[in-house]
Image (cartoon, grey):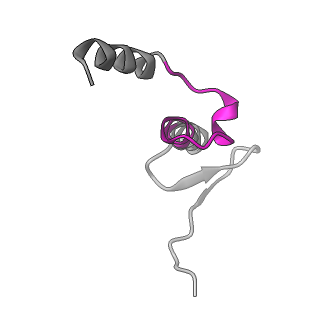
Amino acid sequence: MSQKNNRKREKSIADKYYEPEDYQKQDQLSAGIAETHEQASDTLTEGTIDGKIERENGEREDIPRKGYE
């Protein structure tokens, strides 16, 4: 691939941003962006490192630390 074509490809990748349709697309870039968006969204939703879930009424409870059988 020529250097000029390579730069065009890099620019098109850098210009990509999350779109809700990324969850249905099959290409690797869209799948990666959708997964990253989901991880960031989950982090913002739960939001704490202490392992607590905060309910709408303000109560906080520990996230269960048990495995599944």
Q: Is residue 20 above or below residue 23?
A: above
Question: Residue 47: image x %, image y %?
Answer: 53, 41
| 22 falls in the magenta region | yes
Between 59 and 29, which is closer to the camera in this rendering?
29
Between 54 and 69, which is closer to the camera in this rendering?
69
Question: Residue 23: image x %, image y %?
Answer: 65, 41
Q: Could you tell me which residue is drawn at 54 percent across and 42 percent down?
A: 31
Q: Residue furthest right?
A: 57
Total marks in image? 0
Question: Residue 5: image x %, image y %?
Answer: 33, 16
Q: Would residue 19 be found to the left or right of residue 44 on screen?
A: right
Q: Could you tell me which residue is drawn at 64 percent across and 39 percent down?
A: 25
**Quarter the N terminus occupies:** top left
Between 54 and 44, which is closer to the camera in this rendering?
44
Q: Residue furthest bottom?
A: 69
Q: Could you tell me which residue is drawn at 28 percent across and 11 percent down?
A: 4
Name the quadrant containing residue 26: top right
Q: Could you tell me which residue is drawn at 52 percent across and 79 percent down?
A: 67
| 23 falls in the magenta region | yes
Q: Residue furthest left?
A: 3
**Quarter the C terminus occupies:** bottom right
Between 7 and 56, which is closer to the camera in this rendering?
7
Prevailing SS of the magenta stretch: helix
Query: What's drawn in magenta, residue-wise?
Result: 16-36
Q: Is residue 52 above or below residue 22?
A: below
Q: Would residue 58 be found to the left or right of residue 14 on screen?
A: right
